[in-house]
Image (cartoon, rainbow, N blue to C red):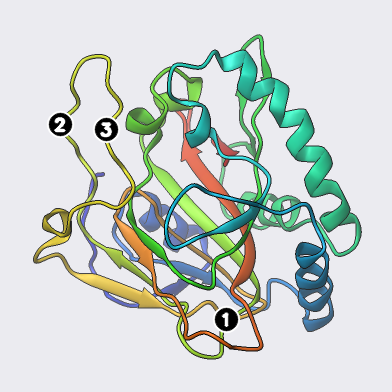
Amino acid sequence: MAGTWTTLEEAPLTRESFAALLENRVPAVRIRGFATPAECAAFARAARSGEIKHYSVSPPVAYIGMAQYEYRWDRPKADYFRDVVIANAKLKPVLDASFDPVARLIERVSAVYDAPVGVGREPGLGEYYAGIVRIASQGIKLHADFAPFNSPAYSNAAIDAQLGWNFFAESLAVGGKTTVYNAPWTPTVAPGEIPQSYDLPRAQVAGARTFTYAPTAGDVVIFNARNPHEVAGGPAGQSTDRIGIGSFIGRMPDRSLVLWS
């Protein structure tokens, strides 16, 4: 990452703010009113009725789709691309019943970026999966995401910057905020090993500047995912959930932007 935060405030999506986010000079960009209240309600309703799985983490995080993270340990890449077809089929009913946030996000980013933006592809194997629906009302532990360390065998490991974006269809009345730490993840990598990226030790972010944002329904928030980040849970018994969809955006050597989950 070339820079460090020059502000602790989020910015609207512009050509300048998006470039600054890629260079880690602003903590976050928010697209307000990304979806209408009717679209949010339809998406949340469809997500609840979708084919939900759970990550093998605590606290539990429910999701629809797939993560490249799950395919990085001693598995052929062909397994991942075989399962992309299955994951897209499970996501399709949610989008059909509401709208396609991934396509809309690509359109909005393309308007402020002067190189191609689209879902990533692996030469000879096909398109990545992009767009994990998550219901994460109990929180997500401290973690970081950067493909050169997370998935070194894939072509997206060539990126030099990685953003994460999330659209929120429903948010918690209390809790659910995300905290981002300005401490770019640069682990020691042993040959043949992929470093731990989830449930990072607190020493990783000791003394770092922080930015915390609320997941307001209807908005998209984008931040630099190489910075460690965590999501606070909410108290039990709330009538709403933290429901959304998101993916990563990586900048390739030719400056094109690729999406994957």
Residue 167 x, y percent position in the rendering = 62, 65
Residue 255 x, y percent position in the rendering = 48, 33
The local crowd at label 3, few if under 14, some if 14 to 19, many if 20 or more residues have their Cα within 10 Å, is few
The local crowd at label 2, few if under 14, some if 14 to 19, many if 20 or more residues have their Cα within 10 Å, is few
* Viewport quadrant of the C terminus: top right
Residue 87 lies left or right of residue 11; in this view the side is right
Tag 1 secondary structure: loop
Which circle's residue, 1 or 3, is located before the other in the chain? 3
Vertical comparison of 13 with 148: above or below: below
Residue most extreme to the top: 124
Tag 2 secondary structure: loop
Residue 35 lies left or right of residue 115; in this view the side is right
The residue under label 1 is: 216
Residue 161 x, y percent position in the rendering = 38, 41
The residue under label 3 is: 195
Determine which quarter of the picture holds residue 31: bottom right
Residue 210 lies left or right of residue 118; in this view the side is left
Which circle's residue, 3 or 2, is located before the other in the chain? 2
Q: Does any portion of residue 139 appear in the rendered image?
A: yes
